[in-house]
């Protein structure tokens, strides 16, 4: 792809590097002779265009009148052996076909196969586990046999497959004994086992630390892949860097472990009386009635072995509705804190239980429940109310990862760092848990939106924090360099890993802060709420996000979304020359960057009086327009002129934004 030079200064440096010794390098051509290649409409994929034509999506950014979405229900029974870290399970899946076509096959995600010795992956593992072992695989009671490679086709199905299943890496395709007609359903039954990897890997692991072993268990069961109106079956291999695109469904899960282990999970615990002591059950009930933190299981009780009911093994039963995944955490050393958050609800406020599970000695974790309480309440006020009845924060080997109603958090030395990670991961309860985006393909849709929310929450909880400035600084360290990549590039194609951090987190977080400054807080917040409300428990794509903002703002925003999301240009305004004129000051502002924007310029005179002017976008969108000269009324000689004094724009060189009188 052609790389547009980030600035005139970079062009000069490159010319100097290539010039013969002893020769003078000519100045580059004036920027006003260069056209605007980054001003163009936002492109759409063929699949999204077909969805618009089919009426499953609307050009306004809303779900279309013919929008459809599959549904799935899981009943899972699992047993975890903490000593060997082996997890065995069986599941019954009811898959409902709400699509307009009959289905001859079903695609499964077998995420644990990324930990095999030969797996293709773009992250490091510390020890292979062998992946998942499939036992019985049946459809409507008929057992399927594995089929030789190529007879079914995992990513692209063959024309005349035989009934059976084929595994290819982290994917499997089941060819069904009979087609599933629109409106019909089928039942899958699968038995499986695998070892949980040790700490040092990603997203799921066990760890021996702080006096005991803790498990963060995710991507642990065979899971039906998404079938949607834009791409069909999402048969994308899991390589590690990218995350997940998942179907919404209901879960009924039973997890059996030795007595003494506490378990936190997606969903609501259905049998507290079977697994918890009467004292812990009573404290848990009290936590739902107070804003203070209740110690449900204390360190003293843990030391005395009275954390759970006695017995050899106990089964914890959880139920969750309308969630896109299920994960759990477990340890025989966990302490348990709980409190409540209040969020808006129909007819008044409602209560959300906040749980915190951690091992003694984890720094600042006595405040973790309070941090979760603030985050859930803050995001509910800013966006749409948290939809689920509980949220669990579990300490362990995973540095930060989100699942419905459950987040995994590692230990942080600083209090503010722990809050930031908790707020970030709980922000994911909105994106992508409640608004079910394809985060595997478009990482900015979950990480970027959540980074913006995290920064907002941190600045609210820690007055004086400059979270947005820190995020913007992280982006500007890479902006315009060769290792910057467009936000719309698939995560698995982004390398090195540092480039993914910018493309997924800091750049989109910065762009949302900029867009709010351009549109105004009221319009921006209304657009975010509209997008969240209309796509709750559905599958939006980037163009739904873009179109929703244009609809709510009532203006074309392609000039903003195309260059910032699809390209890697930069923005750079420079003030000068400046001269005093009768009754004011004449200012020339030059656009040295690739991407235009509306900008405010403020002049300050002797005595402190100031005047401002807003230079509209249209001043920069002409094919050869690069400068604007204007006069601001000002009493007294000018002492300072500044472009973008509010700090809204991601300007790569803020030093040339300011002119001061000598």
Image (cartoon, grey):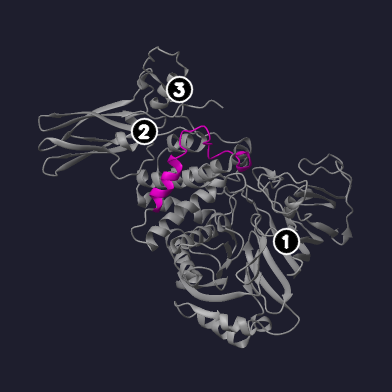
Identify the image quadrant of the N terminus: top right
- Element under label 1? loop
> In terms of sequence position, does the residue under pointer 2 or pointer 1 come before the other?
1
| 440 drawn magenta | no
Identify the image quadrant of the C terminus: top left
Quick check: marks 1 and 3 in contact, CB under 8 Å? no
> In terms of sequence position, does the residue under pointer 3 or pointer 2 come before the other?
3
The residue positioned 41% from the left and 56% from the top of the image is: 456
**Image quadrant assignment for residue 267:** bottom right
Which-is-in-front pick, marks 1 and 3? 3
Give the CA separation, mark 3 to mark 2: 18 Å
Give the CA separation, mark 2 to mark 1: 49 Å
> In terms of sequence position, does the residue under pointer 1 or pointer 3 come before the other?
3
Q: Which residue is mark 3?
A: 14
Residue 204 is situated, as x and y percent measured from the top left of the image, at: 66, 59
**Image quadrant assignment for residue 278:** bottom right
Q: Residue furthest bottom?
A: 278
| Disc 2: CA contacts within 10 A as few (<14), some (14-19) or many (>=20) | many
**Span colored in magenta:** 467-494
Residue 314 is situated, as x and y percent measured from the top left of the image, at: 72, 78
Q: Which residue is mark 1?
A: 196
Which residue occupies the foreground of this view, 260 or 193? 260
Which residue occupies the foreground of this view, 150 or 393? 393
The residue positioned 73% from the left and 60% from the top of the image is: 221
* Badge count: 3
**Label drawn at residue 572:** 2
Q: Is residue 137 above or below residue 25?
A: below
- Element under label 2? loop
């Amino acid at each position: 792809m052609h790389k547009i030079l980030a600035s005139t200064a970079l062009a000069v440096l490159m010319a100097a590097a290539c010039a013969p010794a002893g020769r003078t390098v000519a100045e580059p051509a004036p920027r006003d002779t260069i056209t605007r290649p980054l001003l163009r409409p936002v492109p759409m994929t063929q699949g999204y265009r077909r969805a618009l034509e089919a009426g499953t999506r609307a050009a306004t950014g809303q779900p279309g009148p013919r929008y459809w979405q599959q549904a799935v229900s899981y009943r899972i029974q699992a047993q975890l052996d903490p000593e060997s870290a082996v997890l065995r399970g069986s599941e019954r899946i009811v898959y409902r076909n709400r699509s307009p076509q009959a289905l001859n096959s079903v695609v499964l995600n077998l995420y644990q196969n990324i930990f095999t010795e030969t797996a293709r992956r773009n992250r490091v593992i510390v020890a292979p586990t062998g992946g998942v072992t499939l036992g019985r695989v049946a459809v409507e009671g008929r057992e399927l046999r594995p089929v030789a490679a190529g007879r079914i086709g995992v990513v692209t199905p063959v024309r005349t497959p035989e009934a059976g299943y084929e595994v290819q890496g982290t994917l499997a395709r089941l060819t069904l004994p009979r087609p599933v007609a629109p409106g019909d359903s089928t039942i899958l039954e699968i038995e499986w086992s695998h070892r949980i990897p040790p700490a040092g890997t990603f997203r799921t692991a066990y760890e021996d630390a702080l006096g005991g072993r803790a498990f963060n268990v995710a991507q642990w069961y065979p899971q039906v892949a998404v079938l949607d109106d834009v791409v069909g079956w999402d048969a994308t291999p899991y390589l590690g860097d990218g995350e997940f695109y998942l179907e919404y469904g209901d879960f009924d899960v039973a997890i059996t472990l030795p007595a003494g282990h506490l378990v936190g999970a997606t969903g609501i615990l259905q049998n507290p009386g079977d697994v918890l002591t009467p004292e812990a059950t009573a404290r848990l009930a009290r936590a739902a009635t107070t804003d203070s933190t209740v110690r449900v299981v204390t360190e003293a009780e843990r030391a005395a072995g009275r954390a759970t009911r006695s017995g050899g093994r106990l089964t914890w039963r959880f139920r969750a509705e309308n969630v896109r995944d299920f994960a759990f955490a477990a340890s025989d050393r966990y302490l348990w804190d709980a409190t409540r958050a209040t969020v808006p609800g129909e007819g008044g406020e409602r209560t959300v239980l906040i749980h915190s599970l951690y091992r003694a000695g984890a720094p600042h974790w006595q405040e973790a429940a309070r941090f979760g309480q603030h985050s859930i309440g803050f995001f509910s006020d800013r966006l749409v109310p948290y939809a689920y009845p509980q949220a669990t924060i579990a300490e362990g080997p995973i540095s930060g990862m989100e699942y419905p109603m459950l987040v995994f958090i590692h230990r942080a030395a600083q209090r503010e760092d722990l809050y930031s990670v908790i707020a970030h991961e709980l922000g994911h309860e909105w994106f992508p848990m409640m608004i079910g985006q394809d985060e595997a393909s478009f990482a900015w849709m979950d990480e970027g939106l959540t980074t913006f929310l995290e920064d907002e929450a941190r600045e609210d909880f820690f007055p004086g924090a400059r979270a947005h400035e820190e995020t913007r600084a992280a982006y500007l360290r890479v902006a315009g360099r060769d290792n910057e990549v467009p936000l719309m590039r698939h995560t698995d194609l982004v390398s090195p890993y540092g480039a993914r951090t910018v493309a997924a987190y800091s750049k989109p977080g910065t762009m949302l802060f900029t867009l709010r400054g351009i549109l105004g807080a009221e319009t921006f917040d209304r657009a975010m709420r509209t997008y969240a409300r209309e796509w709750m428990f559905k599958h939006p794509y980037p163009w739904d996000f873009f179109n929703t903002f244009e609809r709510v703002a009532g203006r074309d925003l392609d000039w903003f979304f195309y260059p910032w999301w699809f390209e890697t240009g930069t923005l750079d305004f420079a003030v000068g020359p400046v001269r005093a004129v009768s009754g004011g000051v004449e200012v020339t502002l030059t656009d040295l960057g690739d991407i235009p924007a509306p900008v405010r310029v403020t002049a300050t005179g002797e005595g402190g009086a100031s005047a401002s002017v807003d230079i509209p976008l249209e001043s920069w969108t002409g094919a050869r327009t690069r400068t604007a000269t204007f006069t601001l009324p000002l009493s007294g000689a000018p002492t300072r002129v500044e472009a973008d004094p509010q700090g809204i724009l991601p300007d790569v060189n803020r030093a040339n934004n300011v002119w001061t009188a000598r």
